[in-house]
Image: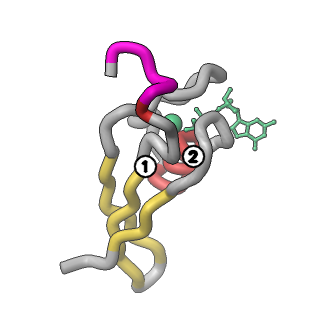
């Protein structure tokens, strides 16, 4: 089992952008509107001799603030 590093934080602070940079991908959709990321994205990252799973999350949010939740 690989260690999992999870990116958490408030909406629209750059979590998905950071995820894409670390995984060298465009997998996570980033946008300048909060709450774009809803599902958790996972990717295996190999850095030097270290291997881990990185997870991009939707971050903190209050349920009642999200439409159609
Ligand atoms: N100025 C600036 N904008 C950034 C940076 N990282 C991300 N952004 C922008 O901030 C917005 C939100 O980014 P996103 O990755 O979707 O944030 P998330 O909601 O935390 O996943 C996008 O318009 C990004 O282009 C940064 O380091 N500096
Ligand atoms: Mg995001």
Helix, strand or loop for disc 1: strand
Q: Magenta region's main secondary structure?
A: loop
Above or below, 54 against 68 in this view is below
Q: Give the residues in magenta.
A: 64-68
Q: Marks 1 and 2: CB-CB under 8 Å?
A: yes
Above or below, 12 against 32 in this view is below
Magenta span contains residue 18: no
Residue at 33% in and 66% down: 53
Magenta span contains residue 66: yes
Quadrant occupied by the C terminus: top left
In the rendered image, the residue lying farthest to the top is: 68
The x and y percentages for residue 10 are 61, 45
Q: Which residue is mark 1?
A: 56
The x and y percentages for residue 46 are 39, 70
Determine crowd level at label 2: few under 14, some 14-19, many 20+ residues with C-alpha closer than 10 A.
many
The x and y percentages for residue 59 are 50, 46
Helix, strand or loop for disc 2: helix
Quadrant occupied by the N terminus: bottom left
Residue at 43% in and 62% down: 6
Q: Say the numbered circle drawn on residue 15.
A: 2
- Is the residue at mark 2 in contact range of ligand 1, meaning its CB lies under 8 Å from it? yes
Q: Earlier in the sequence, mark 1 or mark 2?
A: 2
- Is the residue at mark 1 in contact range of ligand 2, meaning its CB lies under 8 Å from it? yes
Locate residue 14: give its quadrant: top right
Q: Nearer the viewer, residue 47 or 40?
A: 40
Residue at 58% in and 52% down: 9
Left or right: 56, with 39 as reference point: right
């Amino acid at each position: 089992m690989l260690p999992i590093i999870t990116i958490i934080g408030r909406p629209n602070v750059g979590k998905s952008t950071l995820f894409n940079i670390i995984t060298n991908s465009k997998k996570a959709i980033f946008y300048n509107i909060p709450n774009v990321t809803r599902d958790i994205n996972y990717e295996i990252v190999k850095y030097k001799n270290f291997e881990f799973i990185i997870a991009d999350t939707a971050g903190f949010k209050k349920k009642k603030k999200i439409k159609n939740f």
